[in-house]
C-alpha cells in the first residue's frame, strides 16, 4: 500500500483515501449493490419464480373474507403453533402467504426460529394451497443476501456489511473532493484509452446517481444503527432490547401461553374494525400469538401507503374475545419518525413503479461504479508495473489476487444470479428442500466462476465468463417460454405485467453483459509500450 507523502495537498490525500477505502471492500460492496438493487423488485422476482401464481385471480375481494380463509386454513393445519403470520394479497402479491412457527422439538435444538418456520401459498378465492406451487425463496433470498450474506451468522454479517458501508461513505465523499471537474467529467468518455476509459466510466456511473449513492449508503447504516451503537438502549431500557424493539416498531408485546385453551374469535370483524379506523385502508399483515390459547393476541398491521416512513399503525385484539387491546404507531415521536423516514428511503416501499424503476437503475449504476473502480485500479497498476512484469515474466502476487477477485466477483456474480433463476425453472416443482437447492445453485455457480478466475485470470477468461453470464440472462425469457405458458407473447398482452417486466429486464441485462464481452474482444491501439511489454501488460487486463 502506498504511503501518504509528507506535505501533500488535500486532493492528493483524498485520492489516496478514495482508492484504498474503495478497493479494500469493493467485492463485498458489489454483492451488496447487486442484491440490494434486486430488492427493489423482490416481489416481482418472487412472482416470476412462482409460475403457478401467474394465473391467480385478481379482482375486488374483501380483505376480511381473505383473512378469514387464511385463518380457517391455519386453524386446520397448525392449531398448535406458537405463532401465525398472514400476508394478505395486494397489487404486487396476488396470493395469500401464511407462515407458522411450530413448537420446538428435540431435533430443533440450537437451530433457531428459522428452522421451525413453515409456509404455504394460498389461493385468495378459496383459501386452499395452490396446486403445484413450488417452494422458493424468490426475491426474499436476494433481499436478505445483501445484508445477511446467507452463510455467515446474521450479526457478524451485518457488522461486515456495516463496516463496508462506512468505507463506501468515505470513498464517495473523498471521490467528490478528489475530482475538481467531476460534473464536467460526467460528459467525457474516451473509448479505447486504457485507464482513461475506465476512469471516465467510473466517473459517469458515480455522478449519474451521486445523490442516490449518498442516500443509500447513509440510510443503510441507519437501518442497523442500534446494533452498531446499542449503548443508549442499554442505558434507557436496562438491556431489555425486546421492549425497545416493540416500542420502536409499534409491535405488540410478546405474550406467554396460559394454562387454558380457547377458541379464536372470528378475524373478519377485527379486520373490518381496523379498516374503519384506518379510513378504509386494509391490513397488510396479521400476526397471531399463541393461537388456540386464552392469552392469544391478534395484531393487524396497516398496508403501506405513499408515506416514506416505515412505522405503520397496528391494532392489537384479544384473540379469544376480539376486543381491541391497543392501537399502536398512530403517533410517532420525532426521533422515531426521523429514523423511520431514513429506513423508508432505503427500502423504498413507498415508491410507485416508475420511482422504483429509477431506484433500480440507480442501483445498477452503483454496482457498475464499484466494478469500474476496482478495474481501474488493476489496469493502472498493471500499466505502471508493465516493465517489471516483462522482466520477471509473471504478475506480482498482490496484483494477481486483485485481478482474480475482480474476475470472480464482477463476472462471476451475474452467473450466480442467472443460475438461481435457471434452477427455479429446471428443478422439479415438488422437490424436497427445493428452495435450498436453488440457493445452492447460486453459490455453486459463483464458486465455479471464482475457481476459474483464480486458475486463469486472463482477458480470455473475462470474455468466457461474461459471455456465459450474458447467455444465461438472455436465455431466461426463452426458458420461461419453454417451461410455462407465461411467456412474453402472453404477458405483454394479458399480464401479469410484472412477469413481462422481469423477462424484458433480464434480457436487457444479458444484452448489456454481452456488449461488454464483445467490446472486451476489441483491442485499442497501444502506442507507447514495446511489443513484449504490451503483450504482458494486456494479458490479463480487461
Image (tube, rainbow, N blue to C red):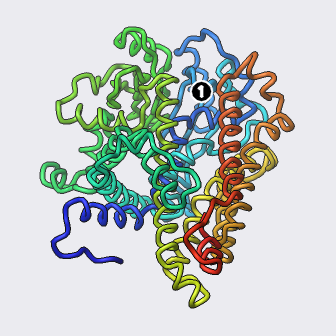
Residue at point 25% right, 74% down? 4
Under circle 1, the secondary element is: loop
Name the one closer to the observer, 20 or 291. Answer: 20
Q: Is residue 27 visible?
A: no
Q: Which percent across, then down, holds residue 345?
A: 36, 34
Name the one closer to the observer, 521 or 403. Answer: 521
Q: Callout 1: 10 Å neighbours few (<14), some, many (20+)?
A: some
Q: What is the quadrant of the N terminus in the image?
A: bottom left
Q: How many marks?
A: 1
Where residue 310 sits, quadrant-wise, is top left
* Residue 233 falls left or right of residue 34: left
Where residue 229 sits, quadrant-wise, is bottom left
* Residue 186 falls left or right of residue 101: left
Name the one closer to the observer, 529 or 426. Answer: 529
Residue at point 41% right, 13% down? 275
Establish if 17 lies above or below 202.
Answer: below
Establish if 228 lies above or below 223.
Answer: below
Q: What is the quadrant of the C terminus in the image?
A: bottom right
The residue at which mark 1 appears reads as 93
Amino acid at each position: 500500500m502506498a504511503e501518504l507523502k509528507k506535505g501533500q495537498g488535500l486532493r492528493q490525500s483524498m485520492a489516496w483515501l478514495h482508492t484504498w477505502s474503495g478497493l479494500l471492500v469493493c467485492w463485498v460492496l458489489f454483492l451488496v449493490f447487486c442484491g440490494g438493487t434486486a430488492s427493489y423488485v423482490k416481489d416481482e422476482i418472487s412472482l416470476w419464480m412462482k409460475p403457478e401464481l401467474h394465473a391467480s385471480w385478481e379482482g375486488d375481494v374483501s380483505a376480511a373474507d381473505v383473512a378469514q380463509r387464511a385463518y380457517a386454513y391455519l386453524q386446520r393445519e397448525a392449531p398448535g403453533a406458537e405463532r401465525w403470520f398472514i400476508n394478505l394479497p395486494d397489487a404486487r402479491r396476488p396470493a395469500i402467504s401464511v407462515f407458522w412457527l411450530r413448537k420446538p422439538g428435540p431435533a430443533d435444538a440450537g437451530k433457531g426460529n428459522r428452522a421451525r418456520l413453515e409456509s404455504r401459498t394460498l389461493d385468495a378465492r378459496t383459501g386452499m394451497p395452490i396446486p403445484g406451487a413450488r417452494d422458493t425463496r424468490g426475491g426474499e433470498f436476494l433481499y436478505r443476501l445483501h445484508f445477511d450474506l446467507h452463510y455467515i451468522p446474521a450479526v457478524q454479517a451485518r457488522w461486515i456489511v456495516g463496516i463496508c458501508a462506512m468505507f463506501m461513505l468515505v470513498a464517495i465523499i473523498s471521490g467528490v473532493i478528489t475530482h475538481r471537474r467531476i460534473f464536467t467529467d460526467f460528459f467525457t468518455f474516451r473509448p479505447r484509452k486504457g485507464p482513461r476509459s475506465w476512469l471516465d466510466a467510473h466517473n459517469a456511473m458515480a455522478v449519474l446517481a451521486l445523490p442516490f449513492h449518498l442516500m443509500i449508503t447513509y440510510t443503510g447504516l441507519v437501518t442497523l444503527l442500534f446494533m452498531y451503537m446499542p449503548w443508549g438502549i442499554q442505558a434507557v431500557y436496562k438491556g431489555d432490547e425486546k421492549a425497545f424493539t416493540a416500542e420502536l416498531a409499534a409491535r405488540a408485546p410478546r405474550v406467554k401461553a396460559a394454562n387454558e385453551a380457547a377458541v379464536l374469535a372470528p378475524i373478519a370483524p377485527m379486520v373490518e374494525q381496523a379498516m374503519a379506523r384506518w379510513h378504509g385502508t386494509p391490513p397488510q399483515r396479521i400476526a397471531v400469538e399463541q393461537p388456540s390459547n386464552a392469552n392469544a393476541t391478534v395484531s393487524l398491521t396497516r398496508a403501506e401507503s405513499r408515506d416514506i416512513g416505515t412505522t405503520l399503525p397496528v391494532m392489537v385484539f384479544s384473540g379469544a374475545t376480539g376486543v381491541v387491546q391497543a392501537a399502536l404507531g398512530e403517533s410517532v415521536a420525532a426521533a422515531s419518525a426521523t429514523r423511520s423516514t431514513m429506513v423508508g428511503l432505503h427500502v423504498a416501499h413507498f415508491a410507485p413503479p416508475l420511482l422504483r424503476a429509477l431506484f433500480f437503475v440507480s442501483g445498477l449504476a452503483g454496482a457498475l461504479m464499484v466494478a469500474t473502480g476496482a478495474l481501474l485500479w488493476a489496469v493502472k497498476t498493471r500499466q505502471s508495473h508493465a516493465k517489471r512484469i516483462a522482466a520477471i515474466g509473471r504478475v506480482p502476487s498482490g496484483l494477481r489476487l486483485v485481478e482474480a477477485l475482480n474476475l470472480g466477483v464482477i463476472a462471476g456474480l451475474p452467473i450466480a444470479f442467472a443460475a438461481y433463476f435457471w434452477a427455479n425453472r429446471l428443478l422439479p416443482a415438488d422437490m424436497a428442500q427445493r428452495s435450498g437447492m436453488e440457493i445452492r445453485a447460486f453459490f455453486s455457480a459463483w464458486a465455479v466462476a471464482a475457481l476459474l478466475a483464480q486458475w486463469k485470470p486472463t482477458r480470455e477468461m473475462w470474455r468466457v465468463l461474461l459471455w456465459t453470464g450474458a447467455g444465461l440472462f438472455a436465455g431466461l425469457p426463452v426458458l420461461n417460454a419453454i417451461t410455462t405458458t407465461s411467456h412474453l407473447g402472453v404477458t405483454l398482452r394479458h399480464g401479469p405485467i410484472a412477469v413481462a417486466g422481469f423477462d424484458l429486464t433480464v434480457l436487457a441485462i444479458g444484452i448489456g453483459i454481452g456488449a461488454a464481452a464483445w467490446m472486451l474482444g476489441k483491442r485499442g491501439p497501444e502506442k507507447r509500450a514495446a511489443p513484449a511489454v504490451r503483450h504482458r501488460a494486456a494479458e490479463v487486463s480487461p
